[in-house]
Image (cartoon, rainbow, N blue to C red):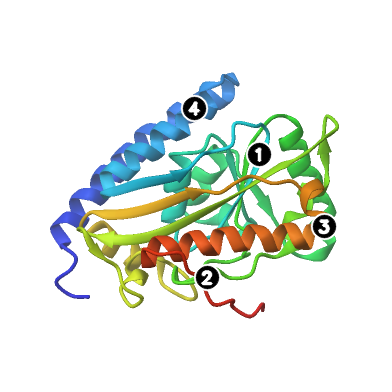
């Protein structure tokens, strides 16, 4: 990977990113305290600026659902997913509880009104109620049903338990679930192969600080985001079928983006 990244570019981008972030934090705090609609709109501005700083170009396919509330079911392979999605969707993320304790990123997650979840069985009902309350209040939520991040070359099976919120109706109507796929496809116009995609994807036991430094030093990244046709549990008949259909749509979208043709990904075995 040597020669691909530039230490000077890393330093400049990281300095600008931190400066922009530190300037944005008090703006969002004030918006939250005043409870204005700007608290929902400002994260879009923040994330779009972050994409420009880091050199990420997003290509959008499909149409984002105009219904509200929406539960967006998305594959997850990098912390960059947050800014990519945050620049396109006016909504809050659902993240594992550990994220709340991360330096800086934990604060940023709280400022975007992230719903933090604990996957242990005794907390499932409580957290489901919190998510339902947010959806009932009109908030859109962004969920990563894989339950972890992958290497970006495949989509792990979607855990149906994480989509249990879709079983609840809001004002007598089933919750709209829209599958969304994210794929990191090109670096400086050159297709990213299987072995170079981890330049951007972050998974397993990768060390975050060094990974961020390298990402900041890379060139222009192309990301393909595809909004697939929305669905409801009333249409699929069960939570498991809903999870499977969302996975099929997302896996197909990722495969199409990284190969340039319609092709199903190999199903990964569930953990």
Percent x, y for residue 177? 67, 46
Q: Residue at x 46, y 29 (%)?
A: 42
Labels 1 & 4 near each other (Cβ < 8 A): no
Residue that numbered label 3 is attached to: 238
Residue that numbered label 1 is attached to: 70
Q: Please identify the quadrant where the N terminus is shown.
A: bottom left
Give the mark nearest the N terminus, 3 or 4. Answer: 4
Q: Residue at x 52, y 63 (%)?
A: 252
Q: Label 3, label 4: how many angstroms apart (C-alpha)?
A: 34 Å
Q: Label 4, label 2: how many angstroms apart (C-alpha)?
A: 36 Å
Q: Label 1, label 4: how many angstroms apart (C-alpha)?
A: 17 Å
Near mark 3 (Cα within 10 A), the count class, few <14, some 14-19 or many ≥20, is some
Give the mark nearest the N terminus, 1 or 3. Answer: 1
Residue that numbered label 4 is attached to: 41
Element on which disc 1 rests: strand
Q: Label 1, label 2: how many angstroms apart (C-alpha)?
A: 26 Å
User: Which circle, 1 or 2, is nearer the viewer?
Assistant: 2
| In this picture, residue 51 sits left or right of residue 189 | right
| In this picture, residue 6 sits left or right of residue 254 | left
Percent x, y for residue 25? 43, 34
Element on which disc 2 rests: loop
Give the mark nearest the N terminus, 4 or 2. Answer: 4
- In front of the other: 140 or 103: 140
Give the mark nearest the N terminus, 1 or 2. Answer: 1
**From what the image shows, is residue 138 above or below residue 196?**
above
Give the mark nearest the N terminus, 2 or 3. Answer: 3
Near mark 4 (Cα within 10 A), the count class, few <14, some 14-19 or many ≥20, is some
Q: Residue at x 33, y 44 (%)?
A: 51
Asked if residue 218 can be seen in this view, the reply is no
Residue that numbered label 2 is attached to: 264
């Amino acid at each position: 990977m040597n020669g691909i990244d530039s230490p000077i570019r890393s330093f400049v981008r990281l300095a600008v990113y931190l400066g922009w972030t530190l300037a944005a934090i008090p703006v969002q705090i004030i918006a939250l305290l005043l409870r204005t609609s700007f608290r929902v709109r400002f994260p879009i501005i923040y994330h779009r600026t972050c994409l420009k700083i880091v050199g990420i170009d997003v290509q959008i396919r499909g149409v984002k659902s105009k219904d509200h509330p929406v539960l967006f079911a998305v594959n997850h392979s990098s912390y960059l997913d947050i800014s990519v999605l945050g620049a396109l969707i006016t909504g809050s993320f659902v993240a594992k509880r550990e994220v709340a304790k991360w330096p800086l990123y934990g604060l940023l997650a709280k400022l975007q009104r992230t719903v933090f979840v604990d996957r242990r069985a005794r907390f499932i009902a409580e957290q489901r109620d919190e998510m339902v309350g947010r959806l009932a209040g009109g908030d859109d939520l962004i969920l990563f049903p894989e339950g972890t991040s992958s290497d970006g070359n495949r989509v792990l099976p979607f855990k149906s338990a994480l989509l249990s919120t879709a079983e609840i109706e809001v004002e007598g109507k089933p919750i709209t679930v829209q599958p969304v796929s994210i794929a990191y496809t090109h670096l400086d116009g050159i297709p990213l192969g299987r072995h170079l995609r981890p330049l951007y994807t972050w998974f397993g036991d990768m060390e975050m600080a060094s990974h961020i430094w390298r990402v900041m030093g890379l060139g222009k990244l192309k990301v393909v985001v595809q909004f697939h046709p929305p669905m409801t549990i009333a249409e699929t008949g069960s939570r498991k079928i809903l999870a499977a259909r969302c996975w099929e749509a997302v896996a197909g979208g990722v495969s199409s983006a990284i190969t340039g043709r319609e092709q199903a990904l190999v199903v990964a075995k569930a953990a």
